[in-house]
């Protein structure tokens, strides 16, 4: 563990830093999945808003 001495003789313990790596660009298959999930999410939210609006205006 990396300890350092501060003023007054106190020890300070720093957390170990994580290993850094470069992010890889998404593959064509991953891009297709992102588009599909985005469309699915927008459809779900739009459907929920439609149902909420329909139920609220039934009276």
Image (cartoon, rainbow, N blue to C red):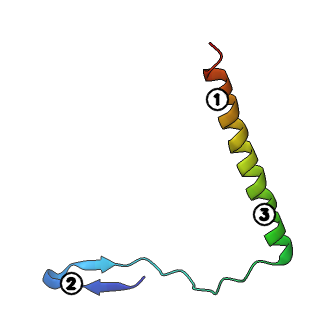
Q: Is residue 19 left or right of residue 36?
A: left
Residue sitting at x 73%, y 82%: 25
Which comes before the other along the chain, label 3 or label 1? 3
Query: Nearest the camera: 14 or 25?
Result: 25
Q: Does 7 sit above or below residue 57? A: below
Residue sitting at x 48%, y 81%: 17
Q: Which image quadrant is residue 44 in?
A: top right
Residue carrying label 1: 52
Query: Nearest the camera: 52 or 4?
Result: 52
Residue carrying label 3: 35
Picture quarter with the C terminus: top right
Q: Nearer the viewer, mark 3 or mark 1?
A: 1
Q: Residue furthest right?
A: 29
Residue carrying label 2: 6
How far, Cα to Cα, is label 3 from label 1? 26 Å
Q: Does 24 sit above or below residue 38? A: below
**Secondary structure state at the residue bearing disc 1:** helix
Q: How far across and how far down the image is residue 34, in percent?
A: 76, 64
Residue sitting at x 53%, y 80%: 18
Residue sitting at x 42%, y 76%: 15
Which comes before the other along the chain, label 2 or label 3? 2
Which comes before the other along the chain, label 2 or label 1? 2
How far, Cα to Cα, is label 2 from label 1? 59 Å
Q: Which image quadrant is residue 22 in?
A: bottom right
Q: How far across and how far down the image is residue 43, in percent?
A: 75, 46
**Secondary structure state at the residue bearing disc 2:** loop
How far, Cα to Cα, is label 2 from label 3? 52 Å
């Amino acid at each position: 563990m990396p300890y350092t001495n501060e003023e007054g003789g106190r020890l300070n313990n720093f957390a170990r830093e994580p290993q850094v790596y470069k992010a890889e660009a998404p593959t064509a298959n991953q891009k297709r999945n992102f588009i599909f999930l985005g469309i699915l999410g927008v459809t779900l939210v739009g459907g929920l808003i439609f149902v909420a609006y329909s139920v609220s205006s039934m009276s």
